[in-house]
Image (cartoon, rainbow, N blue to C red):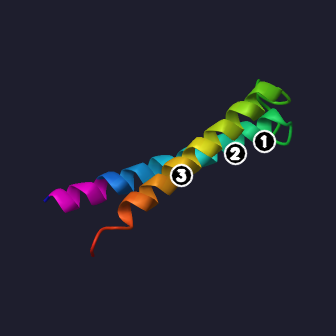
Amino acid sequence: MVVRTLASVRLAVRIVGLFAVLAGLVFFFQGIGVIPGSFMTGRSEWAVIGAALVAGAVALLWLAGIMGSGEKR
């Protein structure tokens, strides 16, 4: 039961991490002006926020991978 719950939590963390990476990339590219049509377009603070979000999400995904690598399947 506990192993199944941990696997579910790990999957949820990976899904959230993936969406955070995608959102961060959109923020970054809007911030540098590649994706137009938003109040974020061309604003450098959104590029910084997007880069930080991508970095945090990648770290989260890496930690989720490290925590799951010791489990026997």
Name the magenta segment's main secondary structure.
helix
Percent x, y for residue 10? 36, 55
Residue 47 in the image: above or below residue 25: above
Q: Nearer the viewer, residue 53 or 27?
A: 53
Picture quadrant where residue 42 is located: top right
Q: Residue at x 75, y 39 (%)?
A: 28
Q: Which residue is mark 2?
A: 25
Q: Secondary structure at mark 3?
A: helix
Percent x, y for residue 26? 70, 42
Name the amino acid type tagged 3: Leu
| In contact (CB < 8 Å): disc 3 and disc 2 | no
* Label of residue 29 in the image: 1
Q: Secondary structure at mark 1?
A: helix
Q: Is residue 59 magenta?
A: no
Name the amino acid type tagged 1: Phe
Q: Residue at x 64, y 44 (%)?
A: 54
Q: Earlier in the sequence, mark 3 or mark 1?
A: 3
Residue 23 visible in the snapshot: no
Q: Nearer the viewer, residue 22 or 38?
A: 22
Which segment is the magenta one? 2-8
Q: Which residue is mark 3?
A: 18
Q: Residue at x 62, y 48 (%)?
A: 22
* Label of residue 45 in the image: none
Q: In the current view of this chain or complex, which residue is farthest to the bottom?
A: 73
| In contact (CB < 8 Å): disc 2 and disc 1 | yes
Q: Secondary structure at mark 2?
A: helix
